[in-house]
Image (cartoon, rainbow, N blue to C red):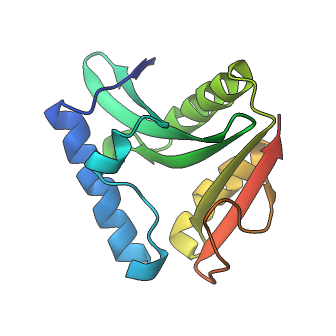
């Protein structure tokens, strides 16, 4: 798997972001969707990676800098055709390593509380993320689970 920083201009990545946003709309009420659109993913505090193998897009992930000590995993998505191939695990390892390289002391995330998000919550728990209170600009939401890890 080749993980590379992405400029979000390719048709494959634009399609995967569209699929990600549709999935959020399918499983979450509008007020509980925190996924970023293409314009928001291009902001300077955002780093976006895509995962490729043999010229085929496997997934993507996003790290947002909240401050000099705290990063947020904003999104992770595996292409449907590549589910259960270790894409999310490899990408999460990459994001954690980058957060440590940047000197972050904490890495946090928000994910859904619904059944569709259970695989994501299990993955984050395996990587030592723990449930926490809302952080940054988030507020308590029954449709959200907030998780964090000390680096």
> In the image, is 15 to the left or to the right of 74?
left
Residue at point 81% right, 35% down? 105
Q: Could you say where residue 14 lies in the image, as x and y percent from the top left? A: 21, 42
Residue 35 point in image, percent of width and height: 42, 59
In terms of depth relative to the viewer, which is nearer, 30 or 84? 30
Q: Is residue 115 above or below residue 13?
A: below
Q: Is residue 65 left or right of residue 103?
A: left
Residue 85 seen in the current view: no
- The reply, left or right, for residue 107 in relation to residue 57 is right
Q: Identify the residue shown where x is 29% and y is 15%.
A: 54
Is residue 120 visible in the rendered image? The answer is: yes
Q: Residue at x 54, y 31 (%)?
A: 91
Q: Residue 37: x and y, percent?
A: 31, 54
* Image quarter hosting the N terminus: top left
Residue 135 occupies quadrant: bottom right
- Is 123 left or right of 44, judged from the image as shown? right
**Eyeballing the image, is 108 above or below 101?**
below
Residue 28 vertical position relative to residue 5 in the rendered view, above or below: below
Q: Camera-side residue: 74 or 93?
A: 74
Q: Nearer the viewer, residue 105 or 129?
A: 105
Quadrant where the C terminus sits is top right
Count the marks.
0
């Amino acid at each position: 798997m080749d993980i590379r920083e992405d400029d979000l201009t390719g048709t494959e990545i634009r399609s995967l972001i569209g699929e990600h946003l549709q999935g959020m709309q399918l499983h979450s009420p509008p007020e509980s969707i925190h996924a970023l659109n293409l314009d928001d993913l291009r902001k300077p505090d955002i780093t976006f990676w895509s995962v490729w193998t043999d010229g085929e897009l496997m997934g993507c992930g996003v790290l947002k800098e909240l401050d000099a000590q705290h990063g947020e995993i904003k999104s992770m998505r595996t292409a449907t055709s590549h589910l259960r191939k270790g894409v999310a695990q490899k990408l999460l390892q990459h994001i954690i390593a980058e957060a440590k390289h940047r000197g972050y002391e904490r890495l946090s995330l928000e994910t859904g509380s619904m059944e569709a998000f259970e695989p994501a919550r299990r993955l984050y728990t395996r990587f030592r993320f723990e449930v926490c209170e809302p952080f940054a600009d988030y507020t308590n939401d029954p449709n959200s689970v907030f998780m964090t890890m000390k680096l």
